[in-house]
Image: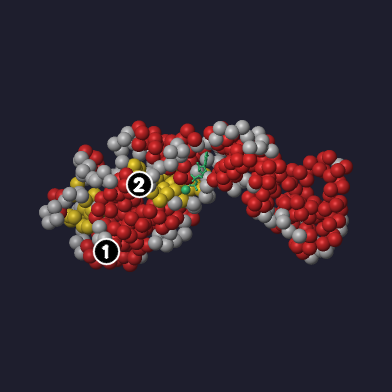
Amino acid sequence: MRTDWQSIKERLRAEFGDAAYKSWLAPIELDSVSATRAVISVPTRFMRDWVQRHYLDRISQMLTDGAAAAPAVEIVVRSAIRAPDAAKAANVEAVGTLSAAARARPRPAAPRSHEDISAPLDPRFVFDNFIVGKSNEFAYAAARRVAEAQTVPFNPLFLYGGVGLGKTHLMHAIAWHIRKADPNRRVIYLSAEKFMYQFIRALRFQDTMAFKEQFRSVDVLMIDDVQFISGRETTQEEFFHTFNALVDQNRQVIISADKSPSDLEGMEERLRSRLGWGLVADIHQTDYELRLSILQSKAEKLGSQVPSKVLEFLAHKITSNVRELEGALNRVVAHATLVGRVFSLEATQDVLHDLLRAHDRRVTIEEIQKRVAEHFNVRVADMHSARRARAVARPRQVAMYLAKQLTSRSLPEIGRKFGGRDHTTVMHAVRKIEELRATDTSFSEDVELLRRMLET
Ligand code: ADP
Ligand code: MG
């Protein structure tokens, strides 16, 4: 066995690079060496697992100069309470022992200030108010599991999805649930932005010890919108350590972001990979059914009798996210209450005209061309081509008609997008399709189907 640990570490650095070295290899210490056996140690259980998995073979080879058949190197977790200069070997605790000890050890009388750092929870964001559909059932089930579990089922729970789809709602719901079930468990919920703010403040006031203590003594830590710390290196560093410390002590960590761990740009690789280690659950865009159920439930809570055709209209039109959907419903209800009128489709359209227009603009002519081409089994290129054969001319006319109906583009603009055609050609197409729709029901249904597909 070799004992020149420093030079081995330098070789590891050269081999694995600075970043990996800094995160994983630098903290390793050589605790004891005999002729046949070496013991190395790392500060946390999490690091032990990682080093074991990724680097131990190589370290063994280096320590034994490649001589040993089986690795004779053991990796252990250094005791957190190790006396600074005591004989090293005596202070190395075997793996399972430490975690048991850590668990048994009474938690330091940490300041009960966690309620101060935790952001307030929205009383409406509870499980009972969360409507489950295809797009969110997995995330919902994972959230419930974490909320109800006595032991940590997966760590971290990583929730991701587009804006306004219920990530914050689910996190608050978990927090409410746990706080109610066991008021003694320390649950902290805060945005990544706030985390960063607190950290920077702690740095400024040279109070990082208290900051660390606050976060590292919680049972459940939830950080919302973690994409916010993209590109913020020091905050990421601190977050990473907090995160590891908690996971190591078997405390639940719950993270949300607008993207999956692997798609988070501006995040350090080691953090990204670490975030994906537990359970990753995504929330997809809502479908019509879910939107309608949400509206029905919200309308009921508002105590107003919104006709189902108004709800259906909203579910059909406001497809972006649940927040906008709620906003639209609130506006419609407020309007009806204020003006004292019954709800009608016309009034709804009127109240929401700006919102609806914004949505309509989202369908592009390119999408229309693509969908229509698919539907009629022609090439997208035929939308622009000069071919006049009915088999391609008709679909092209349908696409022009839909472009007129679904976008706010003018006739000349539409013409330009169809191979530089004249606006009169577009006008002719629109008339032709209207005519056909009036006389041919099955054709009309076809077009209607396309329109619906494009609108949602
Ligand atoms: P995110 O954090 O993903 O941006 P939020 O959790 O803030 O989204 O949700 C936006 C709004 O939509 C909130 O008012 C929330 O209550 C509501 N919401 C989202 N999904 C649902 C759902 N499945 N059922 C009921 N309300 C929902
Ligand atoms: Mg949110």
Residue 23: mark in rendering: none
Q: In the rendered image, is residue 284 in sight?
A: no
Q: Regarding mark 1 in the picture, which secondary structure is present there?
A: helix
Q: Position of residue 444 (x, y in %)?
A: 81, 43
For badge 1, the amino acid type reads Lys
Q: Position of residue 314 (x, y in %)?
A: 64, 42
Mark 2 → mark 1, Cα distance in angstroms: 41 Å
Q: Few, some or many C-alpha atoms within 10 Å of disc 1 (few <14, some 14-19, many ≥20)?
A: some
Q: Nearer the viewer, residue 378 or 172?
A: 172
The residue depicted at 53 percent of the width and 36 percent of the height is: 131
Residue 9: mark in rendering: 1
Q: Position of residue 429 (x, y in %)?
A: 84, 54
The answer to whether residue 44 is above or below residue 315 is below
Residue 118: mark in rendering: 2
Sequence-wise first label, 2 or 1: 1
The residue depicted at 47 percent of the width and 45 percent of the height is: 167
Q: Few, some or many C-alpha atoms within 10 Å of disc 2 (few <14, some 14-19, many ≥20)?
A: some
Q: Nearer the viewer, residue 28 or 149?
A: 149
Q: Nearer the viewer, residue 334 or 340?
A: 340
